[in-house]
Amino acid sequence: MSEEASRTTTALLNSLHDGDNEAAWRQFDDRYRPILIGFARRLGLPEADAVDVAQETTVQFIKEYREGKYDRERGRLRSWLIGIARFRVAGVYRKKASKREYRGESAMITLPEHESELEQVWDTERRTIILQAAFKELQNTTKTDDRNMRAFEMLVFNQIPVTAVCDELDMTAQQAYMAKSRTAKRLKDIIDRIEQLYDEDAT
């Protein structure tokens, strides 16, 4: 991992004050866009709309941050991003609802109202993104034909039934679960390091 990519979120935010620091912008975007896309998807948006919401959220946050509107004393960075993203997601649903109402169709959509519910959605997606990043890093430093890695990927990411995993990889169920456990242990240190980069979402 490069020195630039290993900056904590707090250090990264400090770099964003410089309007000409495109590297900081790209790093912030790389770090949070996948979470925002997943967050919007978990709130029910299709992929294309979720990508748009993520783009609009990061652009709006950077604008407000550089205008001095972001106040860490008022809450975590994630709370600020969640607020923007939820507003954008609601906007997508409002547009869809108006079109459906024009056609005489029902368009009842209910988004989580409580911040704790939205934070739970965010944290779930954040953990997923971190796990995926850690797995990719482990893949890049491990034999690509490692059956343990493949079993973990199929069981955890693809949610494939263990019987199908065993058939494809010529394993017993016990071997598949052991492979999952061994890979999880190998991922732990990488996951811990990546989580530290988020700096508790700059509290």
Image: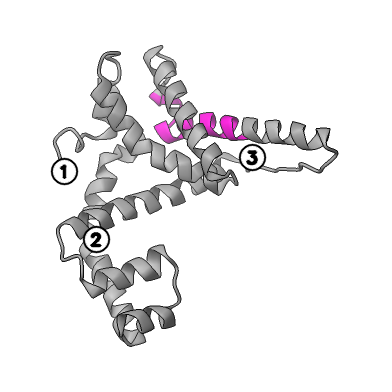
Whichever of callouts 3 and 2 sits on the residue coming sooner in the sequence is 3
Residue drawn at (67%, 36%) of the image = 93
Q: Which residue is mark 1?
A: 1
Amino acid type shown at disc 3? Glu
Whichever of callouts 2 and 1 sits on the residue coming sooner in the sequence is 1
**Residue 123 placed where, x, y %?**
44, 47
At mark 3, the secondary structure is: loop
Q: Which residue is mark 2?
A: 187
Residue drawn at (45%, 68%) of the image = 159
The foreground one among 184 and 150 is 150
> What span is in magenta?
72-89
Observer-side mark, 1 or 3, equals 1
- Can you tell which quarter of the image residue 116 is in? top right
Quadrant in which the C terminus is drawn = top left
Amino acid type shown at disc 2? Leu
Residue drawn at (31%, 80%) of the image = 169
- Can you tell which quarter of the image residue 131 is in? bottom left
**Residue 9 placed where, x, y %?**
29, 33
Q: Which residue is mark 3?
A: 113
